[in-house]
Amino acid sequence: MIRVLLRLWDRLSLYLPVGLMGLVALGTYWLVQSTPVSRVPGVVVPARHEPDYFMSRFSVRTYAEAGRLKSEVFGAAARHYPDTDTLEIDTVRIRAFDEQGLLTTATANRALTTSDGSEVHLFGKALIVRDAQVNKTGQPTPRIEFRGEYLHAFLNTDRVVSNRPVELRRGRDVFQAESMDYDNVRQTMVLQGRVRGTLVPVAGK
């Protein structure tokens, strides 16, 4: 009788590890199925408005497809912000050339420009100057100056706007307004708010 029991125990001991492994596996499966899963959506971290690179005492040039110099930007310091893909420039000076090679310059205490240089926001003692030139019809146009604490220039469309007080000088004529929208391509100027102007008669007329 004892020998029979020993034989049975020997056979059971052979399958005992397999049985224990099976129990552990079943227990693990039950534990996984019974534990509630926390379905927290992925948290999207907003991009911070922090510069990813700096420049000091620099100049940047952009060229048209034909290799023509399109614009040149000088600055005492600059910071690039990747979240808006803009460049903030201290003590800025800009030289821009149109398709005819005519020069427009801009200066300010600070500027914010797009990555392609098509738009420039000028802050603090902003000044934009277009030298006297001859337009497409062959008529001479006088020197034009825009002055203000804020000017927004669209270089590709040759437009200057501002929602703050500005002063416009066209030749010897002077205009002042609380806001302005000047379109050089359409040859239109919209002045709003309290508008004042001084027109100087042309000599001989």
Image (spheres, rainbow, N blue to C red):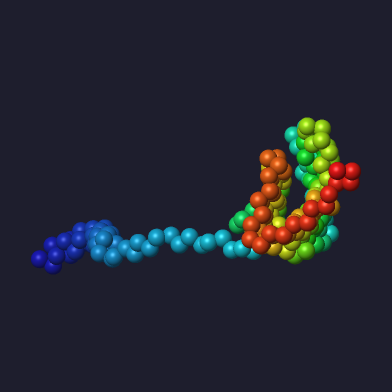
Whether residue 81 is visible here, answered yes or no, is no
| Point 84% across, 38% down: residue | 140
| Point 74% across, 61% down: residue | 148
- 42 sits to left or right of 184: left
Question: x and y percent of residue 59 in the render?
Answer: 82, 52
Closer-to-camera residue (90/199): 199
- 15 sits to left or right of 149: left
Residue at the limit of the structure toward the front, as seen here: 205
Whether residue 140 is visible here, answered yes or no, is yes
| Point 61% across, 56% down: residue | 84
Closer-to-camera residue (110/169): 169
Identify whether 171 is placed above or below 36: above
Identify whether 49 is placed above or below 183: below
Residue at the limit of the structure toward the right, as seen here: 204
| Point 78% across, 63% down: residue | 125
**Quadrant that contains the N terminus:** bottom left
Question: x and y percent of residue 97 in the render?
Answer: 80, 42
